[in-house]
Amino acid sequence: MERLAQFRNKIVLVVFAAIFVLLYVETRVAGNGRLKVDMKDAALKQWRGILYYRDTAFTGQTFALYPTGDTAKLARYIDGKQDGLMLSKYPNGQLAEKRYFINGKKQGVHKGWWENGRLKFEYHFVNDEYQGAVTEWSANGGLFRQFHYENGHESGSQKMWWDDGTIRANYVVIDGQKFGLFGQKLCTNTLSNIRVK
């Protein structure tokens, strides 16, 4: 009976040790999604669009910190591809960017803010391509750019403004053709100003 109790205790001890080892390994292996790695870690390497950690496609969360220890950036990865919410903040804690990825591709609404809290940009993505409105603002809140896209290509009304609010570009794209003011300098012939005697 005593031998049976000792045997049972050894088995329980071995099972607990195995569970402990599995839990320890699970929290350290890059494939489980729980790993958090500083973006400055030299073991993180980007190659051909895949993020690797210690030569394994990384699954987990990367982070960057300001010297104060406050969070600067957070991003999630699955099998080396960015997947999920990516956030970045200014040193004052103000949200700087909010982006979303699925299997390494940009998806949904991506937003950015100036340090003063005003909206900086709002982009719409479907499968890593612009879709719908692409809008940008200057730090003072004025519109800078408002373009429209279909499947990653400019389509419809496209507008840009100078800092003072005057129009810089105003054109329409129909079937890939641009019509209107493109906001580019006109070419001039400098040789026409030279007089030959």
Image (tube, helix red, strand yellow):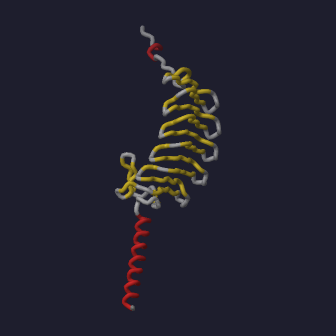
From the viewer's side, name the closer residue of 74 and 138.
74
Q: Is residue 125 above or below residue 165?
A: below
Residue 196, image x, y percentages: 42, 9
What residue occupies the far left of the structure in this picture? 55
**In the image, what residue occupies the spot 57% across and 44% down?**
112
**In the image, what residue occupies the spot 58% across and 37% down?**
136
Q: Quadrant of the N terminus?
A: bottom left
Q: Is residue 112 above or below residue 31?
A: above
Q: How many marks?
A: 0
**In the image, what residue occupies the spot 51% across and 43% down?**
107
Q: Quadrant of the C terminus?
A: top left
Residue 45, image x, y percentages: 38, 53
What residue occupies the far top of the structure in this picture? 197
Q: Is residue 18 above or below residue 151?
A: below
From the viewer's side, name the closer residue of 87 and 141.
87
Residue 175, image x, y percentages: 50, 23
**In the image, what residue occupies the spot 54% across and 61% down?**
69
Quadrant of residue 9 within the rendered picture: bottom left
What residue occupies the far bottom of the structure in this picture? 2
Quadrant of residue 58 within the rendered picture: bottom left
Quadrant of residue 181 within the rendered picture: top right
From the viewer's side, name the closer residue of 146 and 176.
176
